[in-house]
Amino acid sequence: MRSKERISYFYDGDVGNVYFGPNHPMKPHRLCMTHHLVLSYELHNKMEVYRPHKAYPVEMAQFHSPDYVEFLQRINPDTQNLFSNEMVKYNLGEDCPVFENLFEFCQIYAGGTIDAARRLNNKLCDIAINWAGGLHHAKKCEASGFCYINDLVLGILELLKHHARVLYIDIDVHHGDGVEEAFYFTDRVMTVSFHKYGDLFFPGTGDVKDVGEKEGKNYAINVPLKNGIDDGSFLRLFKMIIMKVMDCYAPGAIVLQCGADSLAGDRLGCFNLSIDGHAACVRFVKQLNLPLLVTGGGGYTKENVARCWTVETGALLDVELPNEIPENDYSKYFAPDYSLKSPSGYMENLNSKSYLNSIRQQVCENLSSIQHAPGVQMHEVRRLQPFHYIQY
């Protein structure tokens, strides 16, 4: 057990200034709200706070195709009409609109996750947090589901330079399809996604039978859930599966995507988790005592997103936060009760005990057939990039 975790926290104020459009559910403004809540609880005094570097195109091209990265760099709202073929090719449009400073937005959130991975690799911290990251749907050659650059894949590739095996855990309400797809054929990354599946719910992937292929067979774990899952059911399944994964896989580092759209009352979600229930997953992963990279993800009721990620920042610091929200620049969003915790809602839980049991059995069966802690060759280690320290 480590005596006291060293935590690095990444934030750039410009990340919350971009605007996806008036009717778009993705509001990067939620990141400013989160950061100001973190500041109001004075959590920044207990962490090292960094402004991330802006990821370079060449860094993005570690995973994404160079032509796609180049197009993201070039396109803007005034010129998009001239590139209708490319817009279709790269899946830009309604879900993934072109807006002012789109590429800089991608650079900031991707840079934060890459920097977080590098600090972990160089043992400069035990836990690294980038709430702006977690955009898990982006594919090698196209945008998807409000995601343009897959920072998680880039962060994992960075961790693989120092770790033989990396575990990716995703508690967003949507399937972590982009990350799973990137590592579907390798045993060096195990992806574990807990998500809503069925009823044509986006992205429509993540069946329990999808387990990876070739060297990656049984290294993709999918936990498909139905509407209304509550804290008790979710946590029992989560803890049991993650413990089994730890036993079978023995990872060297963990990446945890904390999409807050799995909370009750989310604008696009259909689960019934309270903030305490969501944060309990974070606490559980933290106590596994491995280098841990934590990101945000989905979350479309922005005041609840800010509450959730602030509580989880506190959880990673082992700090219990008072329920009354201190005065801050975004206080009006938390009216009328100004309380930090949001309870679960009153949705019916459509996940029967027998259904959850069958999922658990299937996952355990898949895990039992993998080679215990596969041996892999290590890759060349690169030097650490410089950081910009923010003083408050």
Image (tube, rainbow, N blue to C red):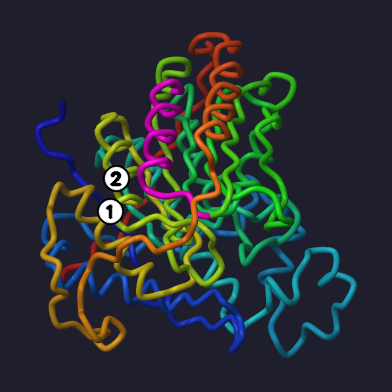
Task: Identify the secondary structure beneath mark 2.
Answer: helix
Q: Amino acid at mark 1?
A: Asp
Q: Position of residue 144 (x, y in %)?
A: 69, 61
State the mark number for residue 66.
Answer: none
Q: Where, by quadrant of the figure, is residue 236 drawn?
A: top left
Extreme residue in the right direction: 85
In the rendered structure, the answer to whether residue 223 lies left or right of residue 391 reads right
User: Does the segment drawn in magenta span residue 172?
Assistant: no
Q: Where, by quadrant of the figure, is residue 180 drawn?
A: top right
In the rendered structure, the answer to whether residue 14 lies left or right of residue 211 reads left
Quadrant of image for the N terminus: top left
Task: Identify the secondary structure beneath mark 1.
Answer: helix
Q: How many marks?
A: 2
388 is higher (above) or lower (below) than 233: below
245 is higher (above) or lower (below) than 32: above
364 is higher (above) or lower (below) than 191: above
Magenta segment, prevailing SS (helix, strand or loop): helix
Q: Amino acid at mark 2?
A: Ala
Residue at 63% across, 22% down? 218
- Relative to the observer, which residue lies in front, 74 or 242? 242
In the rendered structure, the answer to whether residue 67 lies left or right of residue 163 reads right
Q: CA distance from mark 2 to mark 1?
A: 6 Å
- For disc 2, the neighbor class at 10 Å (few under 14, some 14 to 19, many from 20) is some
Circle 2 sits on which residue?
A: 280
- Relative to the observer, which residue lies in front, 105 or 327? 327
The magenta stretch spans which residues?
A: 228-245
Q: Position of residue 345 (x, y in %)?
A: 39, 64
- For disc 1, the neighbor class at 10 Å (few under 14, some 14 to 19, many from 20) is some
User: Does the segment drawn in magenta span residue 239?
Assistant: yes
Marks 2 and 1 in Cβ contact (< 8 Å): yes
Circle 1 sits on which residue?
A: 276
